[in-house]
Image (cartoon, rainbow, N blue to C red):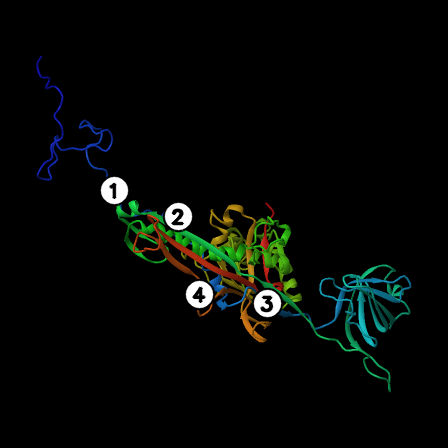
Amino acid sequence: MGLDNSKAPGLSPSQDKVALSSNYMSFTDGTRDFAQQYLPELYEAEVERFGNRTLSGFLRMVGAEMPMTSDQVIWSEQNRLHVSYDTAVVGTNGTIVTVTLPAGNQGATDDCAIRVGQTVVVSDGLNTVKAKVRTVTNSGAAGSRVAAVAVDTYQVAELNAGGLADTTAVKIFVYGSEFAKGTSGMSTAIEPNFTQFNNKPIILKDFYEVSGSDAAQIGWVEVATEDGTSGYMWYLKAESETRLRFEDYLEMSMVEAEKKGANGSTQLAADKTEGSEGLFAAIEDRGNIYNDFAGAAAPGSGALGDFDAILKQLDKQGAIEENMLFLSRATALDFDDMIAAQAGGGYASTANASYGLFNNEEDMALNFGFSGFRRGSYDFYKTDWKYLNDASTRGLTGDIDGVMIPAGTSTVYDQMLGQNIRRPFLHVRYRASEADDRRMKSWITGSVGGAYTSSLDAMQVHFLSERCLCVQGANNFVLFKSTI
């Protein structure tokens, strides 16, 4: 039987870099008759198709980070200076106002702050009567304590004669006092009190692992990471991304965290964690919520009317002059439309529009964006918040449109220090001591990559932080929400 030479010989390496049919290798089926003629072009550099993927930086812009050594941080905030109640009802005889004392901060002996001899304003929103307090009678137990305030009106003999009907819900506030000659002064004094708040830190953890075998097969990739470094990296590129993701989680947790049992949340009894109060939860509980800002859907006066309603609410709170707006892209454009509608008639007359301190020309690239504006006695500085736009975070849900945060600092009483301190309205507290700083810990375990701590044939890079957010003066914050 003869030798069949019809099949091609096997591959023979060439001593020189010469493209021959005998030294061509395939990447598919291992034979020499291939659809591919040349080696594929391999791009070493990664394509950054999502741009800068990190989200952190928001808290660094608006607050600060400070260490603490305890399991919780406690602070006290001032209550209002003047005496008023919005839980009052006109009595059946027209001269008595029953005031229900606020629940939650009263004891069995807490009395109404309205005193005999004071002058008050009583109003149902449409009709208003000024009166003088004759007697105050406190009764009831804690949680249901009430006060019967007997008054003599100035203009009329009874409240209902002034347009306030019996059993009408009213609001009452003190504006002064009046005493006759030769009489004694106030029989009781008002003891100023405060409202106490607290928050507990949460422990965040993450880690990256690579086996010893994978670490031994080095593959180089040219990268440009979001933390500003670039160059060739091998398996530690994944460690870098894990670190960046964890740093984002540190900020996202401070924004989204919920306390155990807060806002209707439930948690397994076996879970020993307590949760923490994040930015959104604090504003939901103690701040101001504005739903569906009008914006482009109702440009001009509609959106401005919505914003003026926000200003009226700020007037009732701390009336802090400077505020920062961190908005989603859609809401930021709504604000731009609102402002533009007040300058030059809006975008419809862009050739004659005047934005800011310069006059636009026909051949000039128009700037339709605004970084700040003033309305009433308030200054507002706005910026986009990437967290609300990213498709893998709040941009996915689309239910949060932005937040308004007061600039500057607040003065509060720190229970740990025992003195008044000034702090940014928004700041992070992290656990730290001389023995251990838990702001951002990182360590390596295993038996690979220089670590020899265990028999595990891998390298594990661990990350840990323990921190919480303090939202002080939350009554000055505004959360913009949308109903989807």
Element under label 4? loop
Q: Choose mark 4 or mark 2, whichever is in front.
A: 4
Marked residue nearer the N-terminal end (3 or 2):
2
Between the residue at mark 4 and the residue at mark 2, the CA separation in whole angstroms equals: 34 Å
Between the residue at mark 1 and the residue at mark 3, the CA separation in whole angstroms equals: 57 Å
| Residue in the image at 49% along x and 64% along y | 430
Nearer to me, 306 or 84:
84
Within-10-Å neighbours for mark 2: few <14, some 14–19, many 20+: few
Within-10-Å neighbours for mark 3: few <14, some 14–19, many 20+: some
Q: Which residue of the protein is positioned furthest toward the front in this rendering?
A: 455
| Residue in the image at 79% along x and 78% along y | 188
Q: Position of residue 364 (x, y in %)?
A: 41, 57
Nearer to me, 129 or 168:
168
Q: Which mark is residue 50?
A: 2
Between the residue at mark 3 and the residue at mark 2, the CA separation in whole angstroms equals: 41 Å
Element under label 3? strand
